[in-house]
Image: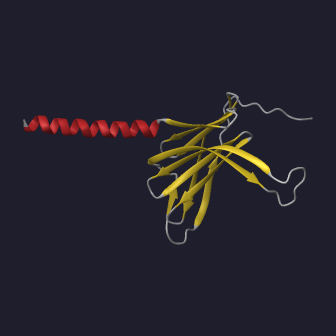
Amino acid sequence: MNLKLKFAGIFILLLGVSAQLKAQSESIELVSPNAEIKVSIHLSDRIYYSISEDNNLLLDKSHLGLTLKNGTLGENPVLISVKKRKGEDFIKPIVPLKFSAIKSEYNDLLMHFKGDYAVEFRAFNDGIAYRFITNKTGDLEVMNEDFYIHFPSNYLINSIT
C-alpha cells in the first residue's frame, strides 16, 4: 500500500509538471480590432513574438527583454496569468490639425510573470506596441532594453520609387 501511495504521488507530481511545461510552450495570440494584424507570443528561455499581417509573416521568432542592474526581465519567464481586453482611448493632439481628438482602438494582452513583473502587448489596426510593467519597490536602474527583430528567411522588401 505504501508503494501505491508513492507511485500516486509521483504520478500527480509529473502530471503537474507536464501541465506547467505545456502551458509554458503554448503560443498566446493577440489580434488587432480589425483582425488584420496578429501577434503570437511564445515563452521559453525568453519572450518570443511573431507578427503577421493578413496572414503574411512580417517578423518571426523575435524576442524582447529588459536588463536591470540586479536582473533581467523576460529571461526564463514563468507565466502566472494572462488577461485580454478591448480598449478605446481618445487622444487630444497638442496641435490639432483636422480633428480635436483621435480615436484609438486596440486589443490588449497583459501577461503577469513570476518575479513581480508583467508585459503588455497592444494590437492596433495599424501596428503593435509593448511595454514592461513592474511592481518592484525602490529605484530601478535600467541597463539595457533587449529588442531583437528577425525577419523570415523569405522576406521581400518592395522599394518605392
Badge count? 0
Q: Is residue 60 visible?
A: no
Residue lying furthest bottom: 138
Residue located 76% across and 30% down the image? 156
Q: Residue 39 is drawn in which quadrant? A: top right
Instruction: Report whether 33 appears left or right of 20.
Output: right
Residue 122 visible in the current orientation: yes
Above or below, comparing residue 75 to residue 19 in the picture = below
Front one among 130 and 96 = 96
Rendered image quadrant of residue 159? top right
Image coordinates for residue 51, horizontal then vertical, percent = 65, 37
Residue drawn at 59 percent across, 64 percent down? 142
Q: Quadrant of the N terminus?
A: top left
- Looking at the picture, the colour scheme in use is secondary structure
Q: Is residue 40 above or below residue 71?
A: above
User: Where in the figure is residue 161, as x and y percent of width and height?
Assistant: 92, 35
Residue occupying image coordinates x 70% and y 28%: 54
The residue lying at 52 percent from left, 46 percent from top is 46
Rendering coords of residue 82 (x, y %): 50, 45
The residue furthest left is 1
Rendered location of residue 148, percent (x, y): 63, 47
In this rendered view, identify the residue nearer to me: 158 or 27.
27
Where 143 falls versus 89 (above or below)? below
